[in-house]
Amino acid sequence: MNRMTHALITLATLSVLAIGSSTAFAQVFTGRVDVTIEDATGGRMPGVLVELTGPGAQSEVSDAQGQAHFLNMPVGTYTLKASLPGFNPFTNNEVQVATGAATPLMIRLAVAGLPEMINVTAVSPLVDTKRETTTTHLTLEELQNIPTARDPWVVLQTVPTIYVDRVNVGGSESGQQSVYLGKGSVGTDNTWNIDGVPITDMGATGSTPTYFDFDMFQEMAITTGGANAQNPTPGVQLNLVLKKGSNTAHGNVRYYFENEALQGNNLSQSFAQQLDTVAGGLSAACRGSNFTEHCGNRTDSYKDYGFDLGGPLLRDHLWGWGSRGKTNPRNLTLNGDPDETVLENYALKIDGRVSANTRGNFTFFQGNKLKSGRDAGPTRPQETTWDQDGPTKYYKGEGTFVVAHSLFAAARYAYVSSSFQLKPKGGLDADFYKDDAGVWHNSYYFYTTTRPQYYAGGDASYFKDRHELKFGFAWRRTPVDSLSQVTGRHIITFHVEYPKMVAQAQQDYVLRTVGEYANAFVTDTISMNRLTVIAGLRWDRQTSSLAATTAPAVLNVPLLPAVTAKAVQNAYEFSNVAPRVGITYALDHSRKTVARGSYAMFASQLPGTAAAFISPIQPYTYIYYNAVDRNGNRVADLNEIDFAAGVRGSNNVDLAHPGVASTTNTIGAIRAPRTQEMLFGIDRELMPNFGASATVTYRYMDNFLWNPRNGVTPASYVQSGTFTGTFESLGTVSVPLYSALSAQPGYHAEHRPDYHRRYLGFELSLIKRMSNRWMGRAAVASTSWNEYFDSAAAILDKTRTVSPSGDYSNLQSSGPLVNGGTVAVQSAGSGKSDTFLVAPRYQVVANTFYQGPWGLDFAANWLLRQGYAQPFYRSRVNTGDPVVSNKSVLLVSKVDDFRLQRVSSLDARLEKIFKFDRFSAAFDLDVFNLFNRATILQRQLDARVTTFNNILELMNPRILRIGARLFF
């Protein structure tokens, strides 16, 4: 038995003895109450019975330090009672528990006399002396009262330093996941969690496997950095807390509605006529109005309705909560094509109290997405859009335990069943093509996937004097089984000055992988008067394995026979130990001003599908030939393909040995990409319920991976030509082209030498809690994210392209190649394909809610950020490179030489509340894009197509949403 195995067994044994431990972020998804009890002289009081009742119930006896701790408590409002014979009892009915926060409560018991009732509200402090992360908490009050498009991605964009690839006007983008980035982290490092369990989709790493009903959430917590050893990656950690039942029945019914009649027009007549000329034509309704109405990207209709209900099933012992919701946005693209989505969600949560020291809960959730017209747009007419369906089901069981007086533990198990398919409207039998304007026709790719998840883990906390020790362990398994297929005869046609064409025969991409993840952490929080030190250590083991599978042959194309992939265990294997250290110091006796600093190391998240790299079945495996259309059907028929002239190019095909059952791809001695973070901040409570927080974050990222072609080094590349041309807005350009002298089949995964990135960001946040009839949250941020090439070894292909570098799947190993240049990430997957995200130099977010007279409430929400990059390029430039012959050549000096317009969006709400004996009713009027801006969000960046620099997407116009809610 080796040392690693022995260590794992030891950790597992400790976990069982403690009734569980994990990386499940228990203290992030729940809250805690820390009670300190003194007598009238200030002396600490042991032996006091402290009882906490509410959404959860627990009792403790104060220790020798006069302290009692209540951990893993569900979010909500509690009643706390403290009693000791000979002293007046203490009662507080307003103890509030928030996600990931500690609520401190100081109690002084007086010598027995008349009983007294204390009702001062106890909440988590605005300035937390034990704070070790940069976390934004979104309470139920903010989620319900601030006008938003009601999905998690619009909430993410209200957090300083997070930027999202789209602008959601009143739900116009709620039918699709957004791509978002944090502090110098890539999207694959983002994580999603529900009530203590990670659900991140490892088949599309960094995304969520499902969509949500917005009224399911009690709170959200969004972490962007810090030294908490429970945070697994340097990415954005999104923690969703579901509602639950309690002894008090509560419920909510809502209906929100939008349609075309409630929408403005944000295009002038002349601008609309110009768009109709250059964008391939606007909608028939726009033309019919003489370009005065119904023009641009629009919402055709939007409906959001549902209910949730919770309460006691057996008072003080068993509680239940359930919800059902449906969201149905229907959008229109610039040319009037519809894009409709139906999101259906069901949830059930049962909580029980077995004894004073044992609680448990079970959660079921189902989310299904039914979509018609996915990815509709000027380059994707209706027949090429997808219809999508596929439910995700989530099952979770949890137990929390008071094992001993100072030992608290929790254990969890969860299973996620996830699958979906994308079926093109043009059907599976049609051949599809791309014309000279860059527009697809006839049909498109077919895709189907199943992605189950298995999870088990737990965590524990132990208190001793000034120390609070946390430790945990978890395991997760994420298989992926997918098929991506070219429809029809498996031949894609590209027009190149039609009727000349390129016929690309492409093999099915069949993927079967298994990701496994194990991790453990330990943290000690040491409290010393004003000084708090948090020291932690985190261990992660991540693997990706390849399962056996076969890709069928492409008929009539002998160079693409069937290919079989054999199973490979632990093709990728990362093992990392990451230290975390945080220090906070209260600068005054009242602890209203706290300085903090931290150091943290993070290992990047390994995609569960990474092992596909060594499969002989690779994505985009194709060969292509020249062709000429002779019958006018615009696709390359077999008798129109010039087979006699031979193969004009290929990708992932060994032309000398087609169909080989082994791969020439290899994986070297590699480790996970690494991020090191230093964070400095100061927090100040300016007045009761109003605080400010300033943070400076510096990150250094290295150990990036790339996959150079076998036999190719930087010295292999020589200049093979120059691309020249004159283009609108760019003028005349001259770009050197490079090609490798020779290359061997296959690629080698290794660390990119002498390459790193740096991130520097500043954020200032102001938070006003609900008091004196109003609340608000505002923040400003300025960020920069740059890449550095420390020697010539960091650049393989010197041809400057738009392709980003440093990703697991990057085969081109090129990019903008500017030392100190801005890092640009192209939105991919479910994102906007022509959006290139760069860290905004300025970002402002603000919202507020005010309770006015006569039951009238007012609220507003504002977003301002710098526009994203426009890295104009020319695709399919033939360089003669044996590695990648056709390249997308960058036509600008820096990716952010040109930027889109800045985005500014103001939303507002007017609400009327009617209060009755047992329930309340609210009628909401929400206005989105109040100033009716027509900001350009996407352009055609490819200079090869005839629609170069055309507008592809505009910000949706002002729209009114009508809503009604009943709640109790």
Image (cartoon, helix red, strand yellow):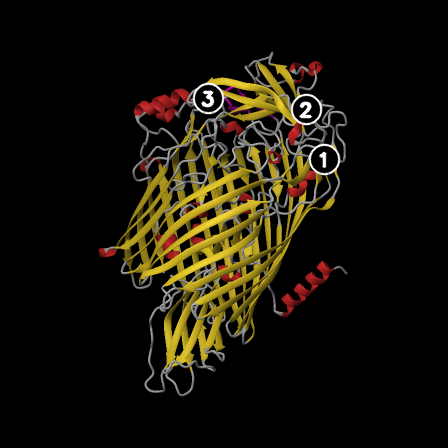
Discs 2, 3 touching: Cβ within 8 Å: no
Q: Amino acid at mark 1?
A: Pro
Disc 1 target residue: 616
Q: Distance from label 3 to label 1 (Cα)?
A: 37 Å
At 43% from the left edge and 75% from the top edge, which residue is drawn? 36
Q: Is residue 76 visible?
A: yes
Q: Which residue is mark 3?
A: 947
Mark 2: secondary structure: loop
- The mark nearer the N terminus, 1 or 2, is 1
- Give left or right: position of 283 versus 525: left
Residue at far top of view = 630
The quadrant the N terminus occupies is: bottom right
Seen from the viewer's position, the closer of residues 960 and 515 is: 515
Q: Which residues are magenta?
A: 430-442
Instruction: Name the spot of residue 684 as percent of width and height, x first.
Output: 36, 59
Among numbered discs 2 and 3, the one appearing first in the sequence = 2
Q: Nearer the viewer, mark 2 or mark 3?
A: 2
Q: Which mark is residue 741?
A: 2
Quick one: SS at disc 1?
Answer: loop
